Amino acid sequence: MNFYSIRHLTRFRYSEPISESIMETRMHPRSDLNQHCLTFSLSVSPRCRVFSYRDHLGNNVQHFDIPGEHNQLVIVAESVVEQQVLPEVPRFLSPDAWAALDDMVNAGDYWEMLLPSTFAVQTPAVTLLASQMGVTRRDDPMLLAQELNERLFDYFRYVPRSTRVDSPIDEAIISGEGVCQDFAHTMIALLRHVRIPARYVSGYLYRGREDHDRSTPDSTHAWVDVLLPHLGWVGFDPTNNLIAHHRHIRTAVGRDYADVPPTHGIFRGQTDSELYVAVHVEAADQPPALDRTLPIPDDWSVLVERAQQLPEAGVPFIDLQQMQQQQ
């Protein structure tokens, strides 16, 4: 059993005061499978009342409205999560695995995770990549998923900020470089190409001294859940060529990133905007004190995105406050 303390810091700065911010966040870790969120808090400055609900996929969502004038918005999410070690998954499945998978799909409600979505779409570049990687209904679904996990790890160069938060899937495929968000979207599109339900997982990846993950440690992370017969949803991390395990901390699942951004909001005003983000994850063998204050990293105010947005005439709100690319 492992325990993790997570602090996720987000700061929007504006060159000119804005008159209102409306925001929702998905930073509250899920409690499912082997994971249980022991405590969660969300602090916002300027101070406001925060409301919560659970969306149709079971993700915890917080939302708030700041109607007063302000030059910056700071969001601090803190949580403590308990993780039990998952059993190892088999290397391959039974000979009837494809038929068993089709039976699961026909009997269940998985259509959302089979159809094209905002970022995981069937483009000519995806079709070509599927042909190059031999993505067909061969072997069994587990073997295919494991092979894709490894081949995408080799295919892409991991280059932080080589793509944007809203980059189309072809941009990373054609350039051969990207971040975890691109790895995940590409794998999802390839799996759906052969009718394997796949979903996007947003969360955090703890990195210990002995771990050699190539994803950025002080940021959010993304990987893929694959529906497999007899096993259910199994996590694959193509960025690091891993089967998702106790170091992967889930916050939200969806069709792709568009369903689960850590922050998503709008503001009223005419201004330049800067976004700073940092994530700090600690591990322990015993549950930490629930009232313990985590340290603020010295480099927490890392500039993630700078944008200039001027509203058109008659448009009162600017949809900008979602630029947290998952690295």
Image (cartoon, helix red, strand yellow):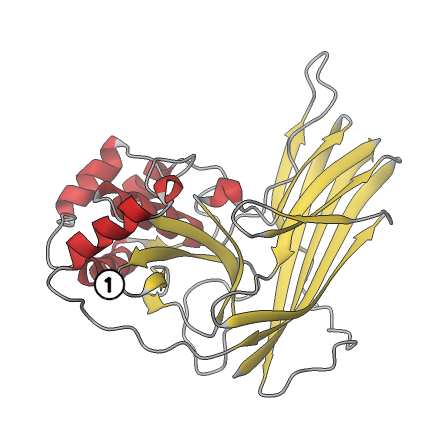
**Name of the residue lying farthest toward the front:** 107
Residue tagged 1? 146
Pick the front one: 38 or 158: 38
Q: Position of residue 284 (x, y in %)?
A: 60, 84
Residue 78, placed above or below residue 175: below
Q: Quadrant of residue 12?
A: top right
Counting labels gives: 1
Disc 1 marks which amino acid? Gln
Q: Is residue 324 left or right of residue 70?
A: left
Q: Position of residue 306 (x, y in %)?
A: 63, 40
**Name of the residue lying farthest toward the bottom:** 285
Residue 85, placed above or below residue 250: below
Q: Residue at x 87, y 49 (%)?
A: 47
Q: Quadrant of residue 232?
A: bottom left
Q: Residue at x 51, y 48 (%)?
A: 57
Q: Position of residue 88 (x, y in %)?
A: 32, 77
Q: Is residue 107 left or right of residue 97?
A: right
SS label for mark 1: helix
Q: Is residue 44 left or right of residue 124?
A: right
